[in-house]
Amino acid sequence: MTVLVLTTSARRAWAGPLVADLRRALPSRTVVAVHQDRHDGAGGPGAPSGADLWVALPPEAVDGIRSVDLAMALGARRAGWAALPSVLASLPDGLVDEPLLVLADTVRLLAEVPALVDGPLVLAARVDEGSGLPFGGALPGVLSLPAAAGPGGEHRRALLRWWSSRAAEAARDVDGDHRSALDGLWHDVPIGTAARALVDPAYRLSARTSDAIELGEHADGATTVGDGPLRLVDLEGLDPARPWWWAEPGARPRRRASTSPPLRHLLHRAAEAVVAADAGAGPTPCPSPDEVVGVPVTPALRRWFRAELAERRQPPNPLVADEAGAFLDVLAGPGRSDGSGVSLAADLVLEDRPDVAAAFPSARWADRDGFVRWLWTHGVRERAIAPAVLPDRPAPRRTVARTRPRGGGVNLVGYLDGDLGLGVAARHLRSALESAGVEVTSVAYDRTSSRRSSGEPAPRLEAPHAANLLMITPDQLPYFVADVGPDFLAGRHNIGLWYWETDVLTERQLSSFGHVDEVWASTRYLADVFAAYDRVPVSLVPVPLEFEDPQVVEGDRARLGLDDRFTVLFSFDFLSVMERKNPIGLVEAFRRAFDEGDGARLVLKSINGEVFPEELERLLDAVGDRTDIEVWDRYLDARDRLALVAVADCYASLHRSEGLGLTMAEAMSVGTPVVATAYSGNLDFMAEGDALLVPAQVVEIGPGQFYPADGHWADPDLDAAAAALRRLADDPAFGRGLTERGREALAPFRHERVGMIAARRLRELGLVR
């Protein structure tokens, strides 16, 4: 038998462990690694360790379509499967007629696999529970074929003829995306005539079947199915850096790893093996899979390429050096007759980005200049279009100067009815201004994913006063201006009361300086951030940190779900960026502070986890098997939310950065001792002696985050945090002393005092009397 492993030179970390599995499970078999991103028949450098032969896709693939064109139409990894019949035909004479087993490099063989040596065979996608019959086609990634000359030879030839035909159809499929175009091949494998479906669940675990296969675990950690070992798993969809999220591309997990400890352990072991193999593989040259000659390879671009193939045309292919220039010329040239009228590249952007198409509904006519400006700015930054194919810039727009009336009260604009910290802050500031005699008209803005509470007036745009106080985040302010129109700001003094959590602003936030005349910062941290850009005047105007008494009564602790254990609480909103809120850091600190039997408990009270299911799963993965750490992802009413803080024994926030830190102030106000990172906005109302401050190192954020990569935030000392938690658990009297001083620290932030500060600044500007 010959075994083919479909891989690329950049994926030796994946292919190497599979080759090792093959040497163990199928000794003495010839292993051929197929280089899916080379199209000249030669393997090139970077062969996986242990492979006997390293070959590439042949230049001609199926039905007159080149292998390199399959790569553009379907992606490199799918192109390898589409070209499979040609790959098999090009094998050396001694191998081409042998029984063949073809595997994706994501497959792992965990035990002996005797069933795979008896083709023609595929893995059943689904199995009827009652009859045990396969349905839904085959699972991608595994194909077994008998010898060409044996009894199954005709079945093998029939299957490969069918395979070639369907692969050519996929390459010319205009309606589907590049994934579904080839997935249809597996779905329609002629089971029962040309192939047999293997229904044994020990061979069929994948992201697509994880909900249908129940796993167990031996005491030695080996994964089991029923009474026997799990023999094969296809890890397609597993990112070794995110083992908690195993799913088909673009989908959610069919089974969350947090609900199955054996699955979670299996995924972590697999991810660790790939990471270890990658560390020893060394760098290998490989073009970016989502960009060619600087052009983003988007779904729309692949569909255009397949449409050209469907018309039996040969489009220039940027993967071929001699054709790259012609490819760029085509993208920059005239587009579709019913398109934008700008260029083919612009047409593809509108096809890929429905949000952009909605923003410029008349891109061919009235919106053309605005659309082209977007391409030159946001389009390039968001990698929607390559600089090499940008159209000519439109003429600059003229601006009209406006005068501002003086006098009146304040139009307070914000998320006034939102269940989020900014909504609480806006409502508190309204009360502070009113306490100082400032007339306030509320303008509730509702473009937020957070739940909106009842009792607030419906959104309104009546704004009679000469000053707009805009409590909208600077990244959202351009959306507000687009929603209500620029006339809402014209002729008024516009004040941005903004929040942000790092020292570097994005381009969108910087553009918001053009909508305001000054900025109010609620903390010294924020004042320093905004003042550093020197665009408009910045004033320090705090928000009130005075909260209603939740009126805790006997029995509230049990009613809210707490028991007698020393309970550490942290509350956060997934919409506020989990990496910044850092609950995983708190989980680790708690683990270092307490063993599971120590009589302590950590409650992570969150909201909006359903909006960020992967982040929620990542947090549950960090919790792992610890029964003394719980995640409560649900809303509570205002009274119960604050009562939960009050009945907890400790409130902990190991945040990386906070513009304000409202929940820490709430804890101090209701008499709960606080452990918090000694960094950012919370230091305005919190000092050593009022709370247990955790030292932290200021670090660069780096790529891959919501915030600018060159921004900074804190990396709290988890050992120090663990010691602080342990001290509060061991010394209740010390905690009581902290709470008394914590309440005193909030005195400067009462409504009346904050209202006086805000009113004084408004009088300085001549906006109120």
Image (cartoon, rainbow, N blue to C red):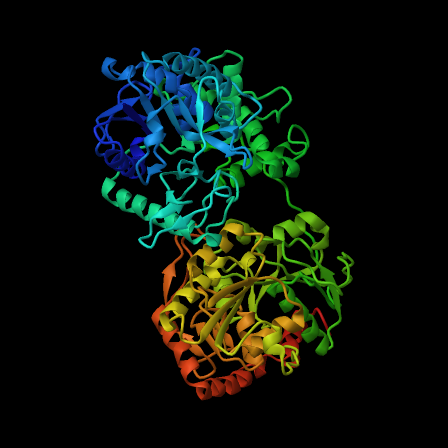
**Residue visible at 53% across and 73% down in the picture:** 664
* Residue 746 seen in the current view: yes
With respect to residue 203, does 100 lie above or below? above
Q: Quadrant of residue 405?
A: bottom right
With respect to residue 114, does 635 lie above or below? below
Q: Which of 604 and 121 lies nearest the eye of the viewer?
A: 121
Q: Which of 767 and 257 lies nearest the eye of the viewer?
A: 257
What count of labels does the image hold? 0
**Residue visible at 37% across and 22% down in the picture:** 119
Indicate the position of residue 443 as horizontal and vertical percent values.
73, 60
* Residue 37 seen in the current view: no
Specify the quadrant that holds the C terminus: bottom right
**Residue visible at 32% across and 13% down in the picture:** 150
Indicate the position of residue 606 as horizontal and vertical percent values.
55, 62
> In screen coordinates, is 159 left or right of 44?
right
> In screen coordinates, is 299 left or right of 341?
left
Q: Which of 113 and 554 lies nearest the eye of the viewer?
A: 113
With respect to residue 373, does 83 lie above or below? above
Q: Which of 317 and 35 lies nearest the eye of the viewer?
A: 35
**Residue visible at 45% across and 44% down in the picture:** 246
Q: Quadrant of residue 679?
A: bottom left
> In screen coordinates, is 403 left or right of 349?
right
Indicate the position of residue 633 as horizontal and vertical percent values.
57, 61
Indicate the position of residue 225 as horizontal and vertical percent values.
41, 44
With respect to residue 141, does 533 lie above or below? below
Specify the quadrant that holds the N terminus: top left
